[in-house]
Image: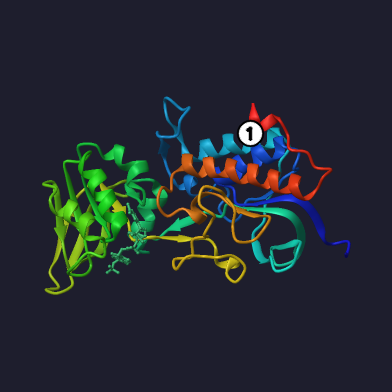
Amino acid sequence: MSDTIEKVKCLIIGSGPAGYTAAIYAARANMFPVLYQGTQPGGQLTTTNEVENFPGYPDGVTGPEMMIQLQSQAKRFETDIRDGWVTKVDFSEGEHKVWVNETKEIHCDTVIISTGASAKYLGLDSEQKYLKLGGGVSACAVCDGFFYKNQEVVIVGAGDSACEEAHYLSKLCTKVTMLVRRDEFRASKIMAARVKNTKNIEILFNTETEEVLGDGQVVTGVKVKNNQTQVVHEIPVTGFFVAIGHKPNTDIFKGFLDLDETGYIINTPGTSKTNMEGVFVSGDAADHVYRQAVTAAGTGCMAALDAERYLAAKDSTFEVSTSNYN
Ligand code: NDP
């Protein structure tokens, strides 16, 4: 083994709630975790304003603040938190190999994948502008819908997510306008029927977003075009929701781990185990259903406990800790 190769007991890839929770548990179990933060330290929550649905924060907390607190908690137990982007893995042989920033090679007894997923956006300049300003663009109705209580919003998309989120928003908002780019839904019949039967949801088929309108600080409306008639009109709203799918950040694991057709890692149900021994998954990289910070944190805990038990079974000198069970 060359001097440049580092050996670690537990490598955690990703720094969202799943990664930091895995780190807290792994560190308390004497697994000396090394955590690579990736290009978006703190994960998707750093793009959220207020988090009101994570238990333990009765007055809410901002996404970035919550991630700083999770990071501090992981550091308190001496997690080695590093900047760096995992660019390549090789899980084909006994010892799992991981490369950071193309160069640094690490050999790991266990790997916990917490790379998350990224919400897809339309990519319009105006959309990105108000997303960055935190001024009315969101890809998570469950996270942000509450801030639009008794207001009018638009949601883009026609899949199950868009239908579910439109229905969720319809219970909070006075009106939800759904923009569907084709003349039909992609969603299951039952989900589509539910939005069609909801009085305060208006569905505009064959309709695409031209521009998100605003006053420089917050969203004030959306300019849309009917792609059949080419007629353009403006809809006054304060919120612009995008629900056009998520992309799990799992490209580097292709060929080593079982992924579903969208790229989500397939885990053994009820566990964090992947098809590769010693490689565990937590958070949104394996979850297209719940996608919540609290469920990501829960599966981060599961991954660390599964990794600990795996190490104990493999190495008789490694003892399962008692600290995680009290
Ligand atoms: P999907 O890929 O199923 O749907 C994405 C939708 O966004 C499609 O209607 C697509 O339009 C539309 N879209 C994509 N790009 C654009 C664009 N640039 N402009 C406008 N519209 C666009 O993603 P979902 O997140 O909805 O669902 C992912 C998976 O999760 C699915 O398998 C789904 O069934 C599942 N799911 C299940 C739920 C449940 O069972 N409760 C809840 C949520 C998700 P088009 O149709 O024209 O391509």
* Residue 191 drawn above or below residue 78: below
View quadrant of ligand 1: bottom left
Badge count: 1
Residue 4 percent location from the top left of the image: 84, 62
The answer to which of 221 and 3 lies nearer the viewer is 3
Q: Residue at x 65, y 65 (%)?
A: 87
Which three-letter amino acid code belongs to the residue tagged 1? Gln
Above-or-below relation of 193 to 144: below
Q: Secondary structure at mark 1?
A: helix
Q: Residue at the location (77% across, 59% down)?
A: 107
Q: Nearer the viewer, residue 238 or 261?
A: 261
Residue 37 placement (x, y as % from top left):
63, 51
The relative height of residue 215 versus residue 182 in the rendered view (above or below) is above
- In the rendered image, residue 227, in percent from the top left (x then y), is placed at 18, 72
Percent x, y for residue 145?
Answer: 30, 42
Q: Residues within 10 Å of mark 1 (few under 14, many from 20)?
A: some
At a point 70% along the width and 30% down the height, the residue shown is: 323
Of residue 326 and residue 32, the one placed in the foreground of this image is 326
Instruction: Indicate left or right for 107 with 275 as reference.
Output: right
The quarter in which the C terminus is drawn is top right
